[in-house]
Amino acid sequence: ADDANQTGRGELDDAVNTHFVALVNIDGGLYELDGRKEAPIHHGSTGQTSFLKDACVVVDTFMQRDPGELRFTIVALAANKQSR
């Protein structure tokens, strides 16, 4: 990879106006993908039926870090049941 084309990660404590994190189920593990961190963060086990509940627990911990902050968005990407 050409280092000249890489974007810096910044520091975890840097003030940022926008920040995106993905929570994913990989082989039964709930992982946080955050470009500012060196590696995925494992938040425990999850499953197909419990993923949304498990992810909400993690999101709640994010919200508790700054309970007065109202500028956030949550998006869920899911299969369309009708197309199956």
Image (cartoon, grey):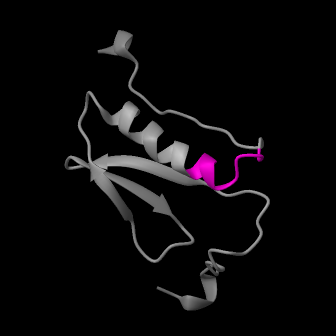
Q: Which residue lies furthest to the top in this view?
A: 82
Which image quarter: residue 78?
top left
Using the image as rendered, state which of residue 11 and residue 5 is in the foreground.
11
Assess whether residue 66 is covered by the magenta stretch.
yes
Q: Where does residue 29 sit, x and y in percent of width and height?
A: 25, 51
Q: In the picture, which quadrant includes the C terminus?
A: top left
Q: Which residue lies furthest to the bottom in this view?
A: 3
Q: Where does residue 52 sit, x and y in percent of width and height?
A: 39, 32
| Residue visible at 25% across and 32% down in the picture | 48
Which image quarter: residue 40?
bottom left
Using the image as rendered, state which of residue 76 and residue 49 is in the foreground.
49
Residue 16 against residue 9 in the figure, above or below = above
Q: What is the magenta range?
A: 62-69
Assess whether residue 65 is covered by the magenta stretch.
yes
Q: Residue furthest left?
A: 27
| Residue visible at 67% across and 58% down in the picture | 19
Q: Is residue 17 shown left or right of residue 29? A: right
Q: Is residue 2 shown left or right of residue 83? A: right
Which image quarter: residue 60?
top right
Residue 49 against residue 61 in the figure, above or below = above
| Residue visible at 57% across and 35% down in the picture | 75
Q: Where does residue 63 sit, x and y in percent of width and height?
A: 62, 47
Using the image as rendered, state which of residue 35 and residue 62 is in the foreground.
62
Q: Where does residue 50 sit, x and y in percent of width and height?
A: 29, 31
Residue 25 against residue 19 in the figure, above or below = above
Give the total number of marks visible in the rendering: 0
| Residue visible at 70% across and 43% down in the picture | 72
